[in-house]
Image: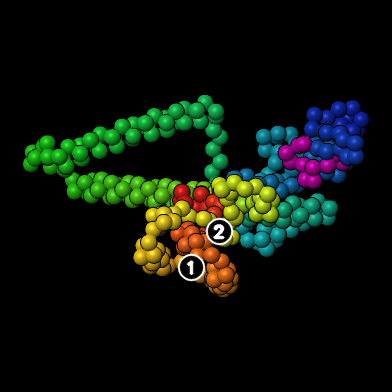
Amino acid sequence: MQHDDVVWSIINKSFCSHKVKTDTRTFCRHEYNLTGLCTRRTCPLANSQYATVREENGIIYLFMKTAERSHMPAKLWERIKLSRNFNKAIEQINENLVFWPKYIISKNKQRFLKITQYLMRMRQLKLRRQKLIVPLSTKIERRETRREEKALVAAKIDNHIEMALLDRLKHGTYRDIYNFSQTAFNKALEAERIEDEEDEEEDEEEELEVEREREMEVDQEAAELHRDLLSEEFVEAETDDENDDDDDDDTQSESGQREEVEMDSDFGHSDDDDDDDDNADADDIEDIKVPAKKSTKTKTKKSTADAAGADPSTTKRRRAKPKLELEYEYEVETGAEREKVRH
């Protein structure tokens, strides 16, 4: 005979291999435990009449233990397969556990519900498309990278060989002996055309850069000229009032001012020449066109009036040495104008 109270007193007070103690609860790791807790009603070892629900390979079974089979450990648990239909499975549990305690019946139904729910979730996850996670070691990754590098090198060599063969075909070294595929030949032509277009684009970009540099240089030079013009100092020339005391003949006049210069007797021979010669010289002088203004007319009138009241010898001398009014203009060339002339 199995004494349940004796077994529970030993399990509860001394030792049990399935018992796990924590700070809050005590759990049971026995595979036939109904709730997973270590209590008097849920312990499968301390109860001679016990029932539980378990799942094996996707199939739900009802396991029952009775005191009549306690002397046969191999046949201690009776297994009953439950239906896939939820309602039929509940009916089977009620039929097999008719006279059992209500606590065990309710806990079995709850366990059956939980098992059916997680089986449904498992089937849904299986039907979904899932990613296959494959672990890779660093050694394999290094080996793959080395192989990729070697493959790239080999591909470049093949490309060089292909280009060399195509060049030979273009130059006609093989003539009609070697038959080469037209697709590869067309690809090579397209590659050359793309290279030519790239070269043209590079040339255009270089020209644009040169033009930009030139524009920048011109702008810099213009800025420098503007700075020179702003920083240039203008010096006033000397006036005629400062040089009135000097009697030198080599004095220089300012720009835009008139000067009276006595000419030598290049137009007449001497003071003792005849009147005919004087008249001829006067005619020659009259032929010379001298720019005259209002101021010069007043001066000539005064000179004629003075000549009428003076001696004839003085008039001859004045005729022999006429006075001419000359204008001198000096242009000061600045540094900015020099730069403009150079460009």
Q: Badge 1: few (under 14), some or many (20 or more) residues near its Cα, within 10 Å?
A: few
Decide whether residue 34 is among the magenta residues: yes
- With 248 as the anchor, is 36 left or right in this view? right
Residue at mark 2 to residue at mark 1: CA–CA distance: 13 Å
Q: Secondary structure at mark 1?
A: loop
- Residue that numbered label 2 is attached to: 260
Residue mark closest to the camera, 2 vs 1: 2
* Quadrant in the rendering for residue 150: top left
**Mark 1: amino acid:** Pro
43 magenta-colored = no
Residue 80 percent location from the top left of the image: 65, 49
Which residue is the site of mark 1? Answer: 291
Magenta-tinted stretch: 29-39
Q: Residue furthest left?
A: 176
Identified at 28% across, 46% down, the residue is: 192
Q: Position of residue 325 (x, y in %)?
A: 52, 62
Marks 2 and 1 close (CB-CB < 8 Å): no
Return the residue nearer the eye: 282 or 21: 282
Q: Give the secondary structure at mark 2.
A: strand
Q: Could you classify mark 2 by the number of other residues whose Cα lies within 10 Å: few (under 14), some (14-19), or many (20 or more)?
A: few
The residue closer to the viewer here, 280 or 84, is 280
